């Protein structure tokens, strides 16, 4: 065995300088790429989080503004309704001043025992309708006779019994329309 050569199977492969630079460059680029990727992912997450918060604030403001708009629409509809009522009343009130106090005093004097007025509705300066309750039929007919006597005195043009209903309690609910003569009650 003179010529024997040994084979080393555990021989460490030595890297050249070029391979070392290439591996270092590969690792460096990988780390930089990973840092950039993480930075971009974090920025996107923070941006989406801030956008979500902005969206929630916008939705909350929209809800408040919608409620305010609904309240304003309700106020506007009431305003329009009030204008319509005023436009209806304006011609009536400008046509002739109604002496409310005198008219009420006049009809209070005409009331008899057992009759009470519950509601008055003015249809024009001279025509109004009132509702009331009479204890019995005799009281109601006496009151109608008393109102009819005012037609003869020329303070009232006409008295019309619109309805009379006997109720469970035994009294009568009635509606009467009265047409006053102009300028007779002051």
Image (cartoon, grey):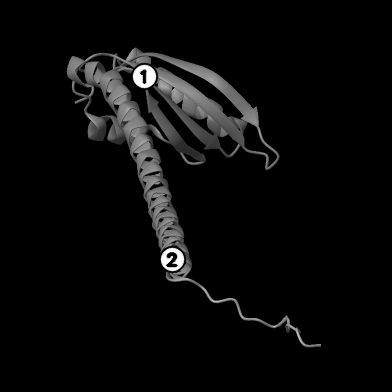
Residue under numbered circle 1: 123
Count all numbered tags in the image, as a single digit: 2
Residue under numbered circle 2: 18
Under tag 2, what secondary structure? helix
Q: Decide if residue 142 is on the left or right side of residue 105.
A: right
Query: Where's the N terminus, which quadrant?
Result: bottom right
Number of residues whose C-alpha sits closer than 10 Å to that of mark 1, classed few (under 14), some (14–19) or many (20 or more): few
Residue at 48% from the left image edge and 67% from the top image edge: 19
Residue at 36% from the left image edge and 35% from the top image edge: 73
Question: Which residue appears farthest toward the front when viewing the image?
Answer: 2
Q: Decide if residue 94 is on the left or right side of residue 176.
A: left
122 or 79, nearer to the observer: 79
Q: Position of residue 183 (x, y in %)?
A: 20, 17
Q: Is residue 126 visible?
A: yes
Residue at 50% from the left image edge and 34% from the top image edge: 132
Q: Decide if residue 109 is on the left or right side of residue 17.
A: left
Quarter assignment of residue 43: bottom left
Number of residues whose C-alpha sits closer than 10 Å to that of mark 2, classed few (under 14), some (14–19) or many (20 or more): few
The relative height of residue 119 versus residue 153 in the rendered view (above or below) is below
The relative height of residue 72 versus residue 81 in the rendered view (above or below) is below
Q: Position of residue 8 (x, y in %)?
A: 71, 83
42 or 10, nearer to the observer: 10
Under tag 1, what secondary structure? loop
Is the residue under label 2 in contact with that under label 1 (CB below 8 Å)? no
Quarter assignment of residue 93: top left
Q: Position of residue 13 (x, y in %)?
A: 59, 76
Query: Where's the C terminus, which quadrant?
Result: top left
The relative height of residue 31 versus residue 81 in the rendered view (above or below) is below
Quarter assignment of residue 18: bottom left
Residue at 54% from the left image edge and 26% from the top image edge: 141
């Amino acid at each position: 065995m003179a010529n024997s050569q040994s084979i080393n199977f555990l021989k460490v492969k030595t890297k050249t300088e070029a391979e070392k630079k290439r591996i270092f460059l590969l690792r460096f680029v990988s780390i930089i790429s990973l840092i950039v990727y993480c930075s971009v992912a974090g920025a996107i997450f923070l941006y989406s989080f801030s956008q979500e918060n902005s969206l929630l604030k916008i939705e909350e403001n929209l809800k408040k503004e919608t409620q305010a708009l609904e309240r304003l629409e309700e106020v506007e509809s009431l305003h329009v309704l009030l204008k319509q009522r005023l436009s209806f009343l304006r011609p009536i009130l400008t046509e002739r001043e109604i002496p409310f106090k005198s008219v009420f005093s006049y009809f209070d004097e005409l009331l008899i025992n057992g009759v009470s007025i519950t509601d008055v509705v003015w249809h024009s300066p001279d025509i109004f309708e009132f509702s009331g309750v009479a204890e019995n039929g005799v009281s109601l007919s006496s009151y109608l006779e008393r109102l009819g006597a005012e037609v003869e005195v020329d303070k009232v043009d006409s008295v019309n019994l619109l309805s009379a209903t006997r109720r469970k309690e035994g009294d009568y609910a009635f509606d009467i329309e009265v047409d006053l003569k102009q300028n007779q009650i002051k």
